[in-house]
Image (cartoon, rainbow, N blue to C red):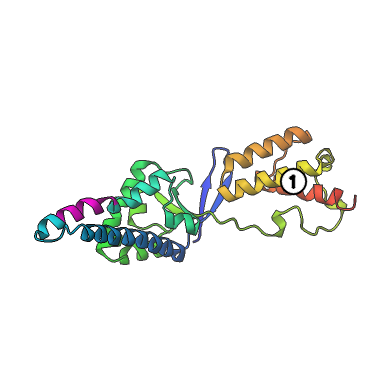
């Protein structure tokens, strides 16, 4: 299963694309590389000051103290960047609660704590196995924190744009779109694309309510379908004008 299905307060089903195992491994590799570079940099700096000369215990103590931030790197980054580290940011994936909402510090902390077991102590074996077998692509840390990792990459097809080739004007469902100018339609598409890209249902719902008010209609369609239909209808109505 590569989808995270959630129910909104309005009882609407929303699907999130789960991050692939490959993208999570690459994101981890990027973060690990950053940590490794930090370690090397600290060692080079200490060596340049000859701190390791004569007292290996002093060198080890100072090295441990200065490299301690690297240990907390995943926790700090995910907390500061709302579920993303630099690696996750590059790969466009993000940690969220299992219901699709933003995770909190305690959940990031639980994921980080269990990473010491399912990633570091077992060389990632347990984490990979758990991600591959669990329903929502969760490693042990995710299971304990009730989180998952989703993809932020928008997967739009031609039917989700106002530029698709549609048959004829008989397919128009909302003729009220004549009230929308080209500028209005472009703004609708811009807001819609932003909502899809950010996986933000609240923006999509607000856009739907605004369009219903402007067009003076009350739709029973899913907000995503409604906005798409409005964009289609506008294109059909004005493509030859």
Query: Callout 1: few (<14), some (14-19), or many (20+) C-alpha neighbours within 10 Å?
Result: some
Considering the numbered disc 1 on the image, is that residue within a helix, a strand or a loop?
A: helix
Residue lying at 30% horizontally and 59% vertically, measured from the top left: 41
Q: Is residue 213 above or below residue 28?
A: above
Compared across the picture, whether 147 is left or right of 18 comes to: left
**Residue 31 seen in this snapshot:** yes
Residue lying at 30% horizontally and 56% vertically, measured from the top left: 115
Residue 55 percent coordinates (x, y)? 9, 58
Residue lying at 78% horizontally and 33% vertically, measured from the top left: 216
Residue for badge 1 = 186
Farthest residue, direction right:
241
Compared across the picture, whether 62 is left or right of 14 comes to: left
Farthest residue, direction front:
49
Compared across the picture, whether 217 is left or right of 157 comes to: right
Prevalent SS, magenta region: helix
Tell me which segment is drawn in magenta.
Answer: 60-69
**Residue 222 seen in this snapshot:** no
Residue lying at 69% horizontally and 44% vertically, measured from the top left: 221
Residue 165 percent coordinates (x, y)? 80, 59
Asked if the magenta segment contains residue 160, the reply would be: no
* Closer to the camera in the image, 67 or 180: 67
* Closer to the camera in the image, 58 or 103: 58
- Specify the quadrant of the image occupied by residue 153: bottom right
Picture mark count: 1
* Closer to the camera in the image, 94 or 202: 94
* Closer to the camera in the image, 170 or 183: 183
Residue 145 percent coordinates (x, y)? 35, 48
């Amino acid at each position: 299963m590569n989808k995270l299905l959630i129910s909104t307060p309005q009882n609407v089903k929303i699907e999130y694309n789960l991050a692939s195992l490959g993208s999570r491994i690459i994101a981890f590799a990027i973060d690990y590389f950053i940590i490794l570079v930090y370690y090397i940099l600290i060692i080079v700096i200490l060596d340049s000051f000859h701190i390791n000369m004569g007292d290996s215990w002093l060198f080890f103590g100072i090295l441990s103290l200065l490299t301690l931030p690297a240990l907390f790197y995943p926790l700090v980054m995910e907390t500061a960047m709302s579920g993303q580290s630099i690696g996750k940011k590059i790969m466009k994936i993000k940690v969220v609660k299992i219901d699709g909402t933003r995770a909190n510090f305690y959940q990031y902390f639980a994921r980080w704590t269990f990473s010491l077991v399912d990633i570091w102590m077992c060389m990632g074996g347990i984490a990979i196995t758990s991600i591959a077998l669990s329903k929502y692509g969760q490693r042990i840390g995710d299971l304990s924190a009730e989180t998952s990792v989703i993809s932020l990459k928008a997967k739009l097809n031609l039917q989700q744009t106002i530029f698709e080739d549609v048959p004829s004007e008989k397919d128009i469902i909302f003729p009220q779109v004549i009230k929308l100018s080209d500028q209005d339609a472009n703004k609708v598409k811009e807001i819609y694309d932003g909502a899809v890209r950010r996986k933000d249902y609240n923006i999509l719902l607000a856009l739907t309510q605004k369009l219903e008010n402007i067009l003076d209609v009350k739709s029973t369609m899913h907000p995503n379908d409604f906005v798409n239909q409005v964009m289609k209808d506008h294109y059909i109505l004005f493509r030859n004008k």
